[in-house]
Amino acid sequence: KAGVTQTPRYLIKTRGQQVTLSCSPISGHRSVSWYQQTPGQGLQFLFEYFSETQRNKGNFPGRFSGRQFSNSRSEMNVSTLELGDSALYLCASSLGRGGSHEQYFGPGTRLTVT
Amino acid sequence: AQSVTQPDIHITVSEGASLELRCNYSYGATPYLFWYVQSPGQGLQLLLKYFSGDTLVQGIKGFEAEFKRSQSSFNLRKPSVHWSDAAEYFCAVGEGPGANNLFFGTGTRLTVIP
């Protein structure tokens, strides 16, 4: 079974631009969560989508948004990029139903904002 | 609020020596606990998890962890470290059924000396 895939792997953007990152979960998984990893703040939860609905949201500004499609693929968007948005963005998928909470992470998208 | 503390930022051990990485959590109810490992430039790989039952859990790559409710701890152990174990290790706590938003510790970087 293929793992979680994220595209692109690397991205360089300029302050003020917007960016869209993509995540394809493991086949059969219906929950997709997004995390931001930075040296200063560590790993922080952004949001989770399950069956095309946002189920949980972390403490991030509204510039960070996401969506999930009917095939469970998910995208996250960051508008009006700031230098502090430079980070590794990790996507994780899980079955999404109660019981097992094993989340499987993708390799991440490294975003650099200049 | 949930929180996870990993008191050791960096640990160095010799190959073949035993290893213990510390993790303390703060959570009101029975926590869902995880250990993940991250190699440079990679995503997170799940080593093991604790939901309920036996407080000593076995994971992949020869790792084990013990849940101690009285100490709010979930320490990771390995009897004999291999050079390939050099990586960053993260402890995480989940809120429970239906919640996939994990709270991560700041990580412990493991260096293995040949």
Image (spheres, rainbow, N blue to C red):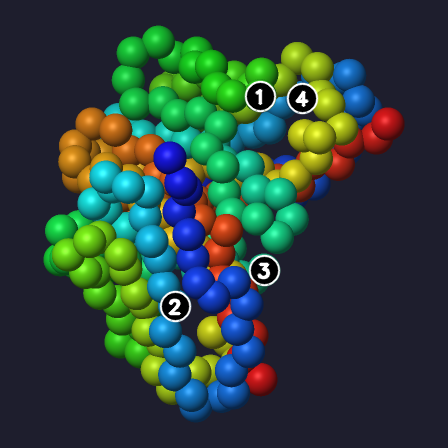
Name the disc covering residue B61, or none.
Answer: 1
Circles 2, 1 touching at the beta carbon (< 8 Å): no
Q: Chain of mark 1?
A: B
User: x and y percent of residue B70 in the render?
Assistant: 38, 18
Above or below, B65 relative to B87:
above
Circles 4, 3 touching at the beta carbon (< 8 Å): no
Q: Chain of mark 4?
A: B
Q: Residue furthest bottom?
A: A16
In whole angstroms, how far apart are the C-alphas of marks 4 and 3? 24 Å
Q: Amino acid at mark 4?
A: Leu
In whole angstroms, how far apart are the C-alphas of marks 2 and 3? 20 Å
User: Of helix, strand and loop, which one carries label 2?
Assistant: strand
Crowding at mark 3 (Cα within 10 Å: few <14, some 14-19, many 20+)? few
| Residue A73 as seen in the image, left or right of residue A70 | right
User: Which numbered disc, 4 or 2, marks the residue closer to the eye?
Assistant: 2
| Residue A71 as seen in the image, left or right of residue A87 | left
Name the disc covering residue A39, or none.
Answer: 3
**Residue visible at 78% across and 16% down in the picture:** B16
| Residue A44 appears in the figure | no
Name the disc covering residue A44, or none.
Answer: none
Q: Are marks 1 and 4 on the same chain?
A: yes
Which image quadrant is residue B34 in?
top left
